Amino acid sequence: NAGVTQTPKFQVLKTGQSMTLQCAQDMNHNSMYWYRQDPGMGLRLIYYSASEGTTDKGEVPNGYNVSRLNKREFSLRLESAAPSQTSVYFCASSVLPPGTGSTDTQYFGPGTRLTVL
Amino acid sequence: SQQGEEDPQALSIQEGENATMNCSYKTSINNLQWYRQNSGRGLVHLILIRSNEREKHSGRLRVTLDTSKKSSSLLITASRAADTASYFCATSSYNFNKFYFGSGTKLNVKP
């Protein structure tokens, strides 16, 4: 049971390049999330998927797109990377969406460190 | 925004002492959770307290919640060097499936 896995671990892009961050969970969770964490700050929600087949914007969605490929996988795409998107990206999953009580505890992946030059 | 704010931003104590960190939030919540993040790692869930609970314990952790003041505190008793990490509170509301994290308290426990 690997939990939440993310690839790649590190990535350097040039401004304008595109890339996709991959996330997978093997816990049969319904909900998945993408966050970014900037130095000295908490996590900010980019996009989330409450259940397979649905996606919704979070706090900072501009410049990103997501795909809930199936119940296990949730990818984050940067179409045209900008230096402001330099950050650490975390994927997380939970049994059920937040607001449902004890089942909305989130499990996090190890993160992807992205630098945009 | 419903974002939680932790206080203090940084805390340095000696091993064996207790560490207390606080979290304030802005709107009504369904529950509040505390997470720990070791340097360079993802977040790990520590404890969840529901809005109708006032106090909860888990090992050396004690969490309190005061919904009238919209605040929570996390107490780590008899701290260890291994407790050195950043601690975040996260809140979720009843009618909307989002999570809001605070900016964290960076705890340093000196051996």
Image (cartoon, coloured by chain):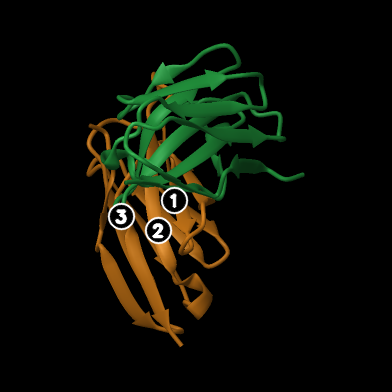
Q: Chain of mark 1?
A: B
Q: Amino acid at mark 2?
A: Tyr
Query: x, y (%) of residue B47?
Result: 51, 50
Q: Which of the two labelled residues, at mark 2 and mark 1, occupies the earlier sequence position? A: 1
Residue that carries the numbered disc 1 in the rendered image? B34
Disc 2/disc 1 C-alpha distance (Å): 7 Å
Foreground label between 2 and 3: 3
The quadrant holding residue B93 is top left
Asked if residue A98 shows in the view, the reply is: no
Query: x, y (%) of residue B110?
Result: 41, 84
Residue that carries the numbered disc 2 in the rendered image? B87
Q: Nearer the viewer, residue A110 or B1?
A: A110
Q: Amino acid at mark 3?
A: Pro
Instruction: Report the side of A27 relative to A39 (left or right).
Output: right
Is residue A12 depicted above or below A32 in this figure? below
Q: Residue at x 32, y 37 (%)?
A: A15
> Could you say which chain is coloured green in the image?
A
- Identify the disc placed on residue A3: none
Q: Nearer the viewer, residue B40 or A58?
A: B40
